[in-house]
């Protein structure tokens, strides 16, 4: 319980100084420890954090893996992210996984693979995640015409408003 409390205290800021020796906590057997450790280490843009995130994706832990990659992922990690999504839809907290992916795309300037926000748009049941995915695609100039046409008829007025002025909107 002390470990969980300590990690919770650090979860909003990260460690004062990155300590690779503590990174094993993202692989801990306790789910709460893993989750909070991911929140702590997601604040650190380090190659070791990136490797841990990729290892977790490979193991099928999409929630923790995507959180760790938020700042540390590089464009070459897009394939690993997409393949982890293609293997199966997230069953453990799909909204958390999709939210993590959106936050990764918003916070990390190095990843510009349009298939990631497109995946969120297609599979997320959350209107806000879908809206943020469309916003990213429009901002990058990579929004497919079919998404624009579909978004123009979306139940969300905010999503419709995002694409109203798009040149492909008809």
Image (tube, grey):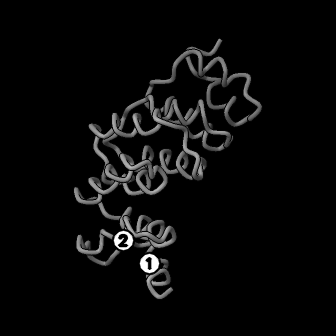
Q: Nearer the viewer, residue 33 or 72?
A: 33
Q: Identify which residue is drawn at 26% across, 76% down.
A: 17
Give the residue at the far right of this rendering.
Answer: 155
* Mark before the other along the chain sequence, 2 or 1: 1
Q: Mark 2 against mark 1, which lies toward the viewer?
A: 2
Quadrant where the C terminus sits is top right
Q: Position of residue 22 (x, y in %)?
A: 29, 74
Q: Nearer the viewer, residue 36 or 27?
A: 27
Q: Position of residue 157 (x, y in %)?
A: 74, 34
Q: Position of residue 110 (x, y in %)?
A: 31, 42
Q: Identify which residue is drawn at 50% across, 45% down.
A: 102
Q: Position of residue 141 (x, y in %)?
A: 45, 25
Above or below, comparing residue 77 to residue 119 in the picture: below
Above or below, comparing residue 146 to residue 24 in the picture: above
Residue 7's mark? 1
- Whether residue 131 sits left or right of residue 8 in the image: it is right
Q: Identify which residue is drawn at 59% across, 21% down.
A: 147
Which residue position is annotated with label 2?
25
């Amino acid at each position: 319980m002390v470990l969980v409390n300590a990690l919770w205290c650090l979860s909003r800021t990260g460690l004062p100084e990155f300590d690779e020796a503590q990174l094993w906590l993202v692989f801990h057997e306790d789910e709460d420890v893993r989750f909070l450790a991911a929140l702590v280490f997601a604040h650190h843009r380090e190659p070791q954090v990136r490797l841990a995130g990729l290892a977790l994706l490979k193991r099928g832990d999409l929630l923790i893996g995507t959180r760790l990659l938020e700042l540390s992922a590089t464009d070459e990690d897009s394939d690993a992210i997409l393949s982890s999504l293609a293997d199966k839809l997230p069953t453990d907290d799909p909204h958390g996984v999709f939210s993590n992916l959106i936050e990764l795309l918003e916070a990390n300037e190095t990843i510009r693979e349009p298939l990631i926000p497109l995946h969120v748009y297609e599979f997320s049941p959350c209107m806000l995640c879908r809206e943020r995915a469309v916003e990213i695609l429009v901002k990058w100039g990579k929004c497919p015409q079919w998404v624009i046409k579909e978004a123009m008829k979306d139940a969300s007025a905010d999503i419709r408003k995002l694409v109203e002025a798009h040149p492909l909107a008809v």
